[in-house]
């Protein structure tokens, strides 16, 4: 399992995951940059993602949905807020309606992804910050922590299937 640590900080309203992969930073970066590679791991195995739009530039939008085992779709969006290729990505992440448009039922969370070389491997740290304690509690109750752990667990397979 690539996840080597996770931490919930209720005071700071953050959920942090640290994972390591047997691939160089530039290769792991492509997993975020290329929507077809992102689909290979974003979302837990029983809820695979489909990215209908993925504008990987600052200010760019991503629209996606995850499809559950019974065909149910959960839709979401990202707005990319910072890119420092190939080491840092920041984005806001929220829920979307059936047209992929943001819904205001819950404020978006903000995620910072950092990639650093550790020898020939890559350490990826994701820190998700929630708008408030209620949002954090709701997302954790919806399975966000276990879902991200399972999603990250699929990255080794995605790395193995695509040439470096």
Image: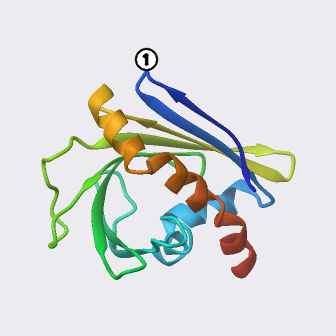
Could you tell me if residue 71 is visible in this image? yes
Q: Is residue 141 above or below residue 51?
A: above
Of the 4 image quadrants, the one containing the N terminus is: bottom right
Please provide percent x and percent y for residue 57.
Answer: 37, 57
| Residue 121 left/right relative to 162 | right
Q: Is residue 137 above or below residue 86?
A: above
- Viewer-side residue, 134 vs 104: 134
- Viewer-side residue, 71 vs 38: 71
Tag 1 secondary structure = loop
Q: Is residue 122 above or below residue 40?
A: above
Of the 4 image quadrants, the one containing the C terminus is: bottom right
Quadrant for residue 157, please give it. bottom right
Residue at 28 percent across and 59 percent down: it is: 77
Label 1 Cα crowd, 10 Å radius (few <14 / some 14-19 / many 20+): few
Residue at 35 percent across and 35 percent down: it is: 137
Please provide percent x and percent y for residue 122.
Answer: 74, 50
* Farthest-out residue, right: 119
- Viewer-side residue, 151 vs 142: 142
Residue at 26 percent across and 43 percent down: it is: 108
> In this figure, which residue is indicated by the disc labeled 1?
11
Residue at 58 percent across and 65 percent down: it is: 31
Please provide percent x and percent y for residue 32.
Answer: 52, 61
| Residue 42 left/right relative to 63 | right
């Amino acid at each position: 399992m690539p996840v080597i640590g996770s931490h919930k900080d209720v005071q700071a309203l953050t959920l942090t995951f640290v994972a390591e992969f047997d691939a160089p930073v530039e290769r792991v970066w492509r997993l975020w940059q290329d929507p077809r590679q992102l689909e290979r791991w974003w979302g837990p195995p029983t809820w695979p993602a489909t990215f209908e739009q993925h504008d990987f530039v600052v200010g760019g939008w991503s629209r996606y949905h995850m499809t559950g085992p019974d065909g149910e779709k959960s839709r979401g969006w990202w707005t990319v807020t910072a890119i420092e290729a190939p080491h840092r990505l920041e984005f806001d992440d929220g829920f979307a309606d059936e047209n992929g448009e943001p819904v205001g039922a819950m404020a978006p969370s903000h995620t910072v992804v950092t990639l650093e070389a550790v020898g020939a491997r890559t350490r990826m740290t994701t820190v998700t910050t929630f708008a408030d304690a209620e949002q954090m509690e709701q997302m954790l109750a919806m399975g966000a922590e276990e879902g991200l752990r399972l999603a990250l667990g699929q990255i080794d397979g995605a790395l193995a299937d695509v040439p470096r």
